[in-house]
Image (spheres, rainbow, N blue to C red):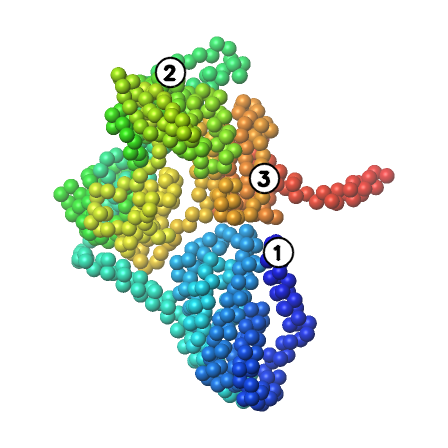
Amino acid sequence: MSKAKSGILTVFVIAFGSYFILDLGQFLALEYVQSQLNTIQDYKNQNFTVAALAYFAIYIVVAALSIPGAVILTLIGGAIFGLFWGTFIASFASSIGATLAFLVSRNLLRDWVENRFGDYLTPINKGIEKDGSFYLFSIRMVPLFPFFIVNLLMGLTGIKVVPFYLVSQLGMLLGTAVYVNAGSELAQITSLSGVVSGSVIFSFALLGFFPLIAKLIISKIQRNKVMKNYQKPKKFDANVVVIGAGSAGLVASLIVAGAKAKVVLIEKHKMGGDCLNTGCVPSKSLIRSGRIMSYIKRAEEFGINNGAGEVDFAKVMERVQKVVKTIEPHDSIERFTSLGVECVQGEAYIESPYTVKVNDRIINTRAIIISTGARPLVPQIPGLNDIDYLTSDTVWELRELPKRLLVVGGGPIGCEMAQAFNNLGSKVIQLDNASRIMPREDSEVSAALSARFEKDGITVLTDHRLIKFKKTSGQNFMEAEHHGQPVRVEFDQVLLATGRKANVEGFGLEGLHLSLTPQGTIETNEAMQTSYSNIYACGDVAGPFQFTHMASFQAFFASINAMLGGLWRMNAKYNVVPWATFTDPEVARVGLNEEEANTRNISYEVTRYDMDNLDRALTDGEAHGFVKVLTAPGKDKILGVTIVGNHAGELIGEFVFAMTHSLGLKKISAVTHVYPTLLEANKLTANVWRKARLPEKYFPWIEKYFRWQRE
């Protein structure tokens, strides 16, 4: 604890303790004040300024110390100073005292509370950041909420000091005036409970809720203002039109059709979207072929001599397409039609929030779900258009293995493709402007993957700023800058893996002026609702997580809310978001890693288990990697998990389940895991956590007890 916090705590403890030790509360009792009222009034008449300052100071101290005495002090203000001066002095004193209590709470308690309840506070702070003044004003208007508790609780949130003071000053003004006015009859008051009638308190409550009601009305007016320029059809052809048949669109369509609502699914290219045709399915199929070849190269490790293999790249790519064709019926028009979805092939164009045009057909719909996905981001680099570059969309057209492949990008896609092509026989150079590959992960993860890449023969060039591409005499090369020095690399093919761009152009969003985020995705609220009340977006086009499983997750909320039509709203929560990169070793994560926790000033403890101790990893010849779990200090609550190793994408599932259902490491430790399996690593990690917390100080006494038993 800092010296400043220690000083604040000391002063607070002394002052608060003195209040009880010296029994100062007796001076705030109704009977005492009534018995001294004439004396106090006489003193005020002779020394108004001194009396006013003394009252002002006492009120501030009581409020700052969070002592329950605001009501009696406000009554005293009315009895002594009258309605005008009593309201004036009490209003400012109460607001200043409240702000001091707010600051005490923020400085002494906020960090501790955030460390232990950060997950619960995050959505609250988001709401406070957006509508904190409305919430505080409403609470201040209602006397049912204890004055001092509001101060302390608001100190734990992210609301700023100045808005807190100003809103408190305004919000408490009317209530202060009412109590001050009641104080004029202080001598006749027999109980504080009878100071203000029930009807007055009820009126306060109505006034308190008025700002929130007004906000809802304003919000509705704003949405209606957006919609008023468009004529609402008298009759609708569909309940929901879904644009884009990728992961998000397919799931949304199935949910709507399953609810027996009319849904039209529009796709301009291929059913299944990127995941089936150019993303997850083909990439993992290619990775599998590359992994088989890597094992062939390691045959001698497993006692197999003269192991040899020759890559037929054309057959590898044919296998990739065969896998796509095998899975394709799952996402086919025939299947979805049989499940009640009307599938339309063509380019959709949103003419209004109620109408979508496709081919020569106009569809009137109650709601629209945009799930148009994303495409590879092609950076603006001089000379790029002069060469035949590849992206994650076009690489599947290759039938001849590139001898020298340059991969631009050190993220998941770049790393997966770099290793897969290297395993199949390409000489791979991977380049990135960042200081390390996989920059979203902890540095030790990047180091482990880099070491493996270099061992496998991949040239990893980080901290390299790409300047230009050039083609001379049929030879491709690129120029980059590394720490001020020029770097030239020749290559046969280049694969761009520098990110993905949301598909938001060409189907009517420009005419609607639909709001976009700084990242270029469609801006949505937690209900997946856009700036138009009946238009929703989900999947890669909405972000922030461009994963297939998150697209499906968002599609659930988008489809349910689209069908409910504003009658009720379900909000998506991103508390537990897992992902995996399918390199060798695989990298999987859920929740926080160390770098994110440090950036967000979240305290944590680390438990680590190294895979080189795991029996199954040893038998498989894959004894490398680790499981790293971040937990709340002093607790087994899981904040995040990173796994590096064989089948990490499968192992992470147990932790995802545990975090989803608020289960800690103790629960995982108590589960029986099959031996020998890789999954045992999770239990052994939990055991490491428990072992580190054994009560070792009692071990000598336990040892003596067992020695006594043997005697």
| Amino acid beneath label 1 | Lys
Residue furthest to the front: 484
Mark 1 secondary-structure assignment? helix
Give the class, few, some or many, for how many residues have Cα within 10 Å of label 1's Cα (few <14, many ≥20): few
The quarter of the picture where the C terminus appears is: top right
Residue furthest to the left: 360
| Amino acid beneath label 2 | Val
Provide the residue designation for mark 2.
311
Question: Residue 477, relative to residue 185: is it above or below?
Answer: above
Q: Are marks 3 and 1 in contact (CB under 8 Å)?
A: no
Relative image position of residue 425 (x, y in whole percent): 39, 17
Horizontal side of 233 relative to 76 (left or right) equals left
Provide the residue designation for mark 3.
607
Residue depicted at 49% across the width and 71% down the height: 95
Give the class, few, some or many, for how many residues have Cα within 10 Å of label 3's Cα (few <14, many ≥20): some
* Badge 1 or badge 2: first in the primary sequence: 1
CA distance separating discs 3 and 1: 31 Å
Relative image position of residue 322 (x, y in whole percent): 32, 25
Provide the residue designation for mark 1.
3
Question: Residue 145, relative to residue 658: is it above or below?
Answer: below
CA distance separating discs 1 and 2: 67 Å
Mark 3 secondary-structure assignment? strand
- In which quarter of the view is residue 381 placed? top left
Mark 2 secondary-structure assignment? loop
